[in-house]
Every structure is written in C-alpha cells, then in structure tokens.
Image (cartoon, rainbow, N blue to C red):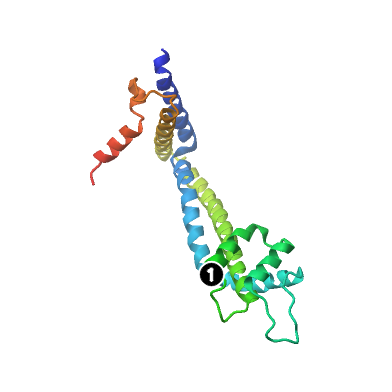
Amino acid sequence: MEGYIFDVAIVAILALFAWRGAAKGLILSLCGLAAVFAAYLGAQFLSDQFCKPVGNILRPIVIQTIRGADAEPQVDPEDPEDTYTVDELLASIREKGLFEGLGQFLEQGVASDTVTGHASLSPMDALAGYLATAIARALLFGIVFFGGLLAWFLLSHALDLAFKLPILAEINLAGGLLIGLVKGAALTVVLVWLGQVAGLVPNPPDTPVLSLFTVDRLWGLLGALPA
C-alpha cells in the first residue's frame, strides 16, 4: 500500500482542484487564470506609452522636493561657471534620504548614461526628469494593473451570473471542473518533478497514476501534438 501513496496524493490533488473549479465555475476559473496576465500586459503597455508625458507633469514636483530638502549642492551665485555634477547631486540626494526606493534605479541610470547623456540639460533637470519618468511608470503600472484586476473581477462576476441561467449553468459547472482539473494536473507535474529532484518520489515512477504525471510524459504528450 505504501507504494501507492503518491497515486493517492495525486488523485486527492486532482479532486481538490476539480471541486474548486466546479465551485467557481467556468467563467470565474477562466477569468481568474487570465486576469493577472491581461492586467500585467495592459499595465506594462500603458505605463511605457504614457510615462513620459506624466513624468513631465511630475518633474516640477520632483525638483521642488529636492530643493525643499536642501539636497541641491551649493554653488557660488556670482560665478556662472560654478556648477555641480549629476554624481554630486545624486550623492546629496542620498545623504538627505530622498527617493530611497529608487536608489538602485538611479545608480543604474547614471552608470548607463541615461541620466548624464543629455548635454543640453542641467544636472538637476536631467536627474529630475529621469526620476519623474520612473515614478510615473510605477504609478501608472500600479493603477492600471490593480484597476484592470478590479474591472476584470466585476466583469467576470457579471458573466458568472449570466451563466447561472438554465443550460448555461451546466456548461459553467462542467467547464469549471475541466479547468480545475487542468490546473491540478499542471501543479501535480511540478510537484512530482520537485519530489524526484529531492529524492522523495521514485524516479522512474513505479505506480500507474504516478507515471502519468512526470515531466517526461508531459513532453511526450506535447511532442505528439500536430505542429
């Protein structure tokens, strides 16, 4: 009986995921699977598209924040040639503890000449523009990502209500069960592989159910699909 303990565990995992999928239904299961990917791709695209115009709006705020904290290096106002470098400004900002969460990002920008590559801009304008764009990208990504998840959540529940009508309810139940089984099978393959790597699961498998959920079997099934 001990030899079949992994088969029992696999069947239990599949039953759990099938039950969860059936309980959630096809619409909620599909939406839950797709929501994160859709929200991430949408947030990535929109933040890249609009980070610069939003960054231009935020740039004066960044400059005011730096100057308000006295983080701008002092220069001689009577000497027009007396100025400071981006490195000196960055060191002063770090000393004042400003934008600590973006410290590594700033250093990468300076190292790659992304900040210092604008000869026509002053160090303050170049660094503030870079910071403002980074902040805008992060804000836009967060807003679009979580807003997308919320919108998808509301839409999926509205569709789920529609699929509780007669006939559609049966499709919803069966589809949810199927999606749950697919998710459970994928998780089982990963767990079996990790168990084999750790020496906890027999390799090669010595029971019929266990042999169905190995990485080799998965690649064999994928390879059998028509190109």
- Number of numbered discs: 1
Local SS, label 1:
loop
The residue that disc 1 covers is 114
Q: Residues within 10 Å of mark 1 (few under 14, many from 20)?
A: some
* Residue shown at the point (42%, 34%) measured from the top left: 190
| Kind of residue sitting beneath label 1 | Thr
Q: Quadrant of residue 101?
A: bottom right
**Farthest residue toward the top?**
1
Res 204 seen here = yes
Whole-percent x and y of residue 25?
A: 46, 38
Whole-percent x and y of residue 7?
A: 40, 21
* 203 relative position to 72: left or right: left
Report the front residue among 88 and 135. 88
Report the front residue among 12 and 115. 115
Whole-percent x and y of residue 181?
A: 41, 33
Res 163 seen here = no
Q: Quadrant of residue 115?
A: bottom right
Report the front residue among 146 and 87. 87
Relative vertical location of residue 67 with respect to residue 167 in this rendering, above or below: below
Relative vertical location of residue 78 with respect to residue 109 in this rendering, above or below: below
* 67 relative position to 59: left or right: right
Q: Quadrant of the N terminus?
A: top left
Relative vertical location of residue 161 with respect to residue 54 in this rendering, above or below: above
Whole-percent x and y of residue 5?
A: 43, 18
* Residue shown at the point (48%, 42%) measured from the top left: 28
